[in-house]
Structure formats: C-alpha cells, structure tokens
Image (spheres, rainbow, N blue to C red):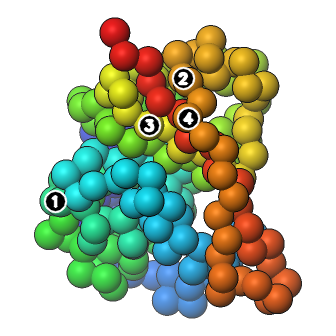
Amino acid sequence: MQIETVDGVEATDDGEPWSLDERFLQEAHHNQYGRPWILGRYMLDFLVESGLRPEHRLCDFGCGALRLGVWAIPYLEAGKYFGIDSHLESLEAAAAYEIPLHGLEAKQPRLLWSQDFAFSHFGTEFDRIVDFSSSQKVDPPELPRLFANLVETLAPGGRFLTAPRLSAQLDSYAEWGLTLVREIEQDAETLRGQGFPSTTTWWEFEKERP
C-alpha cells in the first residue's frame, strides 16, 4: 500500500511501500485523537444513516490512521474510499498496519498526503465528504480556500458532514455553496460512563444544485 502525494507517490527509500514498524504494532496511533478508536464505528453508522451507500465516493478529510476508514472501506465498493491528511506518520500507520491488518488492499483505498487541501488530486467528484475535527484546526484565513477546494470536488447534491463543532459561522457555509440540511446529536452508547464524551454533534450540508 502506497501513499500518494500531489507530485506522485511517497514511498520508502528503496521505492517499496511503507514497511511495518514496531511503533505501529504498539498501536499508539489509536490513542492520538482524544476519544477512543471505537468512535470510528459510530462515525460510519452516522454516515450510513445519513444516506451513504456502497457505491458512493467518500472523501475522508483528515483520515489520519483510518479510525473511520477501517469501517468505511469494507462497507464501500472497491475504489470508492479516498483519504487525505497532512500528518504523514498517521498515513504510514494506515498504509503499513491498518490496511494489511484488516485485509483492505482489495478495496483499493487511496491515501493522499497533502498540506494544501488538494481534493482535486483524486480526479473525481465525491458524493460525501466527511470532516471530523480537521477543518476546525485550519487557520481561519485559510478556511475560504479550503472550502473552495472542497466544494469544487463535491458532486451537486452531495453531502458534507462535519463534527463535533463548526469551523466557521453558519452563514459562511452558505457563502461557500453549502446549505444546512440538519444538525443532530449522535449517541455513542459504548462510551457512556467511561470518562469520554458519549455524544457528538453533526452538521450535514448539501452542495447547491445548478
């Protein structure tokens, strides 16, 4: 499994895909998101409840080490999952550990290392783009460029789903071509009483149709 860059493929020094590293076996990457790894299952549940179908093209913005991806990739048809992240080590953990561990190679997921919101790199339009916390870490002056790139690659009528809070004022999303469909609370039953937030607020937007 290789990691793509805007200029080609990021591989090891000998040109081979990323190799397994002891640090990935320790699964420290499961603990770098602030909330448990199981949250990825609830994220997929929400996407499916919101209309995600196996034939849809899903872009996981800020995919990290595939907390959502290890659930979404098996659900989707081959070649329908696209992950993008600016943190190379997380993508290495995804490519060298999580994808082989879960036997996901045949699903042909594509992973992109990009610090420049290069959604268009994949050369396709997405039916769904999911953003769990990633846009909220972007410097506010960069948000218009982020969303211009994001909306450009979202299919007309496609959905943008973001949590656990908005990265800008609600009227900004309308200016960027996104119409709020609903705001909803999701309950992660497994996390109740475990010292982690068990509810997540989602905002679901639709791209304006021509």
Three-letter amino acid code at the position of disc 3: Arg
User: Measuring 82% from the left and 88% from the top, which residue is drawn there?
Assistant: 193
The x and y percentages for residue 172 are 70, 18
Q: Decide which of tag 4 and tag 1 comes sooner along the chain.
A: 1
Q: Decide which of tag 3 and tag 2 comes sooner along the chain.
A: 3
Q: CA distance from mark 2 to mark 4?
A: 9 Å
The x and y percentages for residue 124 are 24, 31
Q: CA distance from mark 4 to mark 1?
A: 28 Å
User: Measuring 56% from the left and 24% from the top, which residue is drawn there?
Assistant: 179
Nearer to the camera, 185 or 93: 185
Residue under pointer 1: 78
Give the quadrant of the N terminus: bottom left
Three-letter amino acid code at the position of disc 1: Ala
At mark 1, the secondary structure is loop
Residue under pointer 4: 181
Count of residue discs: 4
Q: CA distance from mark 1 to mark 2?
A: 28 Å
Three-letter amino acid code at the position of disc 2: Leu
Nearer to the camera, 28 or 173: 173
Residue under pointer 3: 159
Badge number at residue 178? 2
Q: Decide which of tag 3 and tag 4 comes sooner along the chain.
A: 3
At mark 3, the secondary structure is strand
